[in-house]
Image (tube, helix red, strand yellow):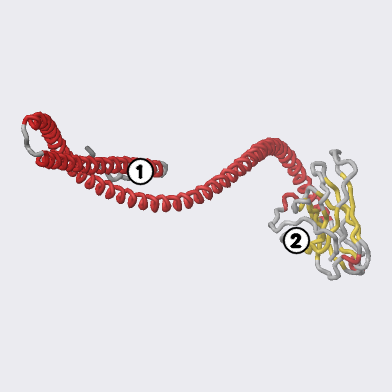
Amino acid sequence: MEETIEDPPTSAVLLDHCHFSQVIFNSVEKFYVPGGDITCRYTLTQHFIPRRKDWIGIFRVGWKTTREYYTFMWVTLPVDLNSESAKQEEVQFKAYYLPKDDEYYQFCYVDQDGVVRGASIPFQFRPENEEDILVVTTQGEVEEIEEHNKELCKENQELKDSCVSLQKQNSEMQAELQKKQEELETLKSVNKKLEQKMKEQKDCWETELLQLKEQNQKMSSENEKMGVRVDQLQAQLLTQEKKIEKLVQEVQDKTEQLEHLKKENGQLFLSLTEQKEHQKKLEQTVEEMKQKETAAVKKQQELTEPRSKKAAAEEQLVQEVERLKAKVEAGKACFLEKYKECQRLHRQIRQLRAAAREVKQDQKSQQEPMGMGSQEPAVSTVIG
């Protein structure tokens, strides 16, 4: 078979012979002598338009599809394709590529769609002999041939009419195809716009997804930090609660001490009052004694009692007065000391209250950002 750069277009579909008359093969011999080139002459009918990929193949008689060609040659396009008249063309097959057996073969014209448009009569490749030189034709055979030619002409006319109808259908289908192509172009344009829009939307979604991932990572990091901070604040809260409990206990202890000191202060105040009253009585007694002394002095002048007795009585009275004064001073010093102790306890209680308020405020400010509510222990201290 002929070796070519490109295989011809073929079809595996079983073909109908209704298109075989669109290309007519001329001067086909009954046999060709092996070893020589052969020229294939054919006529393109006026309604058939050849194309660049059309080809002529040599097929063994009995072929079913165009893939069963033995060898082929590309056709040469006519100079004037727009002419409506029949066109005479030819191709030449080289002897090297021709069959070497004596089977029957025929020429077939195949278009670039793999459709057969014409087929020749069968022929053989064999040497010439004497039997083929003399051809005797009887009158009956001549009439039969003429009748066959009439049938062929009639079939040719029918084919021409069918070709006109097919050309009309082809024009309509070409118009419909053009319309469909325009619709296809419109759909392609719309599809391209949609693809561009989808690409932009996809890019936007990918950007938003990256931002959400970053925010999620940031939130996760912040949540971890907040968890650590919450643990720290809870530990601080426990420490502050322990401090508050300790401060409350200290306040209670100080309150008890204050109550005790109040009682002692009350007792000392009563004692001091009694001592003041006693001192007042002593002062009255001393005044009376002074008056008595004055009277005694006057009476001494009148009486002649011994001086030693009067001096002893005066000395005894002076000692009693000094003793009472010392007792009063000692009561004053004890009262002042108790009073200072009360003042010191009052200051400590005020400091403890201020420290408890600060602890509460710190605890409240630390709990509000976390949305945590804790009930602070009540500190109730009544100080009179």
**Element class at badge 1:** helix
The quarter of the image holding the N terminus is: bottom right
Task: Give percent across and percent down for residue 241.
Answer: 33, 50
> What's under tag 1, amino acid-wise?
Ala
The residue most toward the front is: 304
Task: Give percent across and percent down for residue 205.
Answer: 58, 43
The residue lying toward the viewer, choosing from 323 and 293, is 293
The quarter of the image holding the C terminus is: top left
The residue lying toward the viewer, choosing from 155 and 69, is 69
Residue 38: quadrant of the picture: bottom right
Q: Is residue 324 left or right of residue 118?
A: left
Task: Give percent across and percent down for residue 8.
Answer: 80, 57
Residue 347: quadrant of the picture: top left
Eye-nearest disc, 2 or 1: 1
> Is residue 372 positioned above or below 98 on the image?
above
Mark closer to the chain start, 2 or 1? 2
The residue lying toward the viewer, choosing from 219 and 80, is 219
Q: Which residue position is annotated with label 2?
A: 67
Q: Is residue 72 left or right of residue 208?
A: right
The residue most toward the right is: 36
Q: Residue at x 58, y 47 (%)?
A: 210
Q: Count of labels shown? A: 2
Q: Is residue 262 left or right of residue 32?
A: left
Q: Is residue 262 left or right of residue 371?
A: left
The residue lying toward the viewer, choosing from 27 and 13, is 13
**Element class at badge 2:** helix
The residue most toward the bottom is: 101
> What's under tag 2, amino acid-wise?
Arg
Q: Residue at x 24, y 42 (%)?
A: 333
Q: Which residue position is annotated with label 1?
A: 355
